[in-house]
């Protein structure tokens, strides 16, 4: 049941068009936030808006917004400030990696992954920073288990590099945020039951590249995306007012249990 943990807060959320972004938008709206979302996928974002409004929540959507483009990010944040006068939380959920073995990965795919996993976090944080400083707000970045552990069966070098950088960036922004009253934290999901993962498991079953990771979780299943959203909810809420620079891993124990 909702308890108003984000009551009255203006939350900017990237990547609301599906997966963890949709789950997070619905949870945050139930907890009283005004969700200001964006996505490149206009149709997916519209479906999230429909779901949230059906549940009685408040959500706005800007789509398509290309988070690989600084001008799009600046425009999205500027519009939010014009409508609401402030930002309380920036939640950097959006991510769009490409995968290939390290030795074969093209320079184009490497740069695409950095742009759409690291650069978009950097630019959104930088664009929102003065507004978050004015409100005493918070940033929640989404990292990944790939940023802390290698995986023999997954060709994810570029993804790992980008998400490892997001984790490191979170700590540095937390340090710089102390002077202006901005909290910055990171949540790193493991293998979650998002549409791409479910499709991979359906196609390959026990031979799926993610299977060895899933086998190390506490229930031997891919994680519920809601678990990540609840971790982000805590870090975005006033309950975490004394928490900054933290890195919360939500992976069912896969990174700790061998």
Image: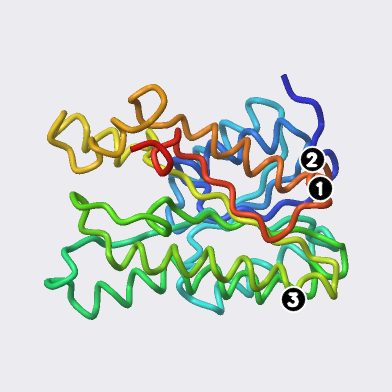
Scheme by which the image is coloured: rainbow
Tell me: 77 left or right of 39. right
Determine contact: label 2, label 3, CB under 8 Å: no
Q: Position of residue 204 (x, y in %)?
A: 13, 34
Q: Earlier in the sequence, mark 3 or mark 1?
A: 1
Determine contact: label 1, label 2, CB under 8 Å: yes
Tell me: 217 left or right of 45. left
Measure the C-alpha gap from mark 3 to mark 1. Answer: 23 Å
Mark 2: few/some/many CA within 10 Å (<14, 14-19, 20+): many
Measure the C-alpha gap from mark 1 to mark 2. Answer: 6 Å
- Seen from this angle, which residue lies furthest top? 1
Determine contact: label 3, label 1, CB under 8 Å: no
Measure the C-alpha gap from mark 2 to mark 3. Answer: 25 Å
Q: Name the residue beneath numbered marker 1.
A: 9
Q: Is residue 252 above or below residue 157?
A: above
Q: Quadrant of the N terminus?
A: top right
Q: Is residue 64 above or below residue 44?
A: below
Q: Earlier in the sequence, mark 2 or mark 3?
A: 2
Residue 176: give its label.
Answer: 3
Tell me: 99 left or right of 182. left
Residue 6: give its label.
Answer: 2
Q: Position of residue 166 (x, y in %)?
A: 51, 66
Q: Position of residue 145 (x, y in %)?
A: 42, 50
């Amino acid at each position: 049941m909702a308890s108003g943990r984000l009551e009255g807060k203006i939350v900017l959320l990237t990547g609301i068009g599906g997966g963890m972004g949709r789950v997070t938008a619905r949870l945050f709206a139930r907890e009283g936030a005004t969700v200001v979302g964006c996505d490149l996928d206009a149709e997916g974002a519209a479906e999230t808006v429909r779901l949230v409004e059906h549940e009685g929540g408040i959500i706005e959507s800007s789509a398509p917004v290309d988070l690989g483009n600084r001008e799009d990010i600046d425009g999205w944040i500027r519009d939010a400030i014009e409508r609401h006068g402030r930002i309380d939380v920036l939640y950097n959920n959006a991510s769009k990696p490409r995968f290939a073995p390290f030795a074969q990965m093209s320079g184009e795919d490497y740069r695409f992954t950095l742009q759409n996993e690291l650069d978009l976090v950097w630019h959104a944080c930088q664009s929102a920073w003065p507004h978050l400083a004015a409100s005493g707000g918070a940033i929640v970045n989404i990292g990944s288990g790939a940023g802390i552990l290698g995986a023999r069966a997954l060709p994810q070098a570029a993804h790992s590099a980008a998400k490892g950088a997001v984790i490191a960036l979170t700590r540095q922004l937390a340090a710089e945020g102390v002077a202006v009253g901005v909290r910055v934290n990171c949540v790193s999901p493991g293998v979650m039951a998002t549409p791409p993962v479910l499709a991979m498991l359906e196609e390959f079953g026990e031979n799926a590249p993610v299977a060895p990771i899933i086998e190390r979780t506490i229930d031997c299943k891919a994680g519920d995306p809601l678990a990540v959203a609840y971790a982000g909810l805590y870090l975005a809420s006033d309950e975490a007012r004394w928490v900054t620079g933290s890195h919360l891993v939500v992976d069912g124990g896969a990174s700790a249990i061998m």
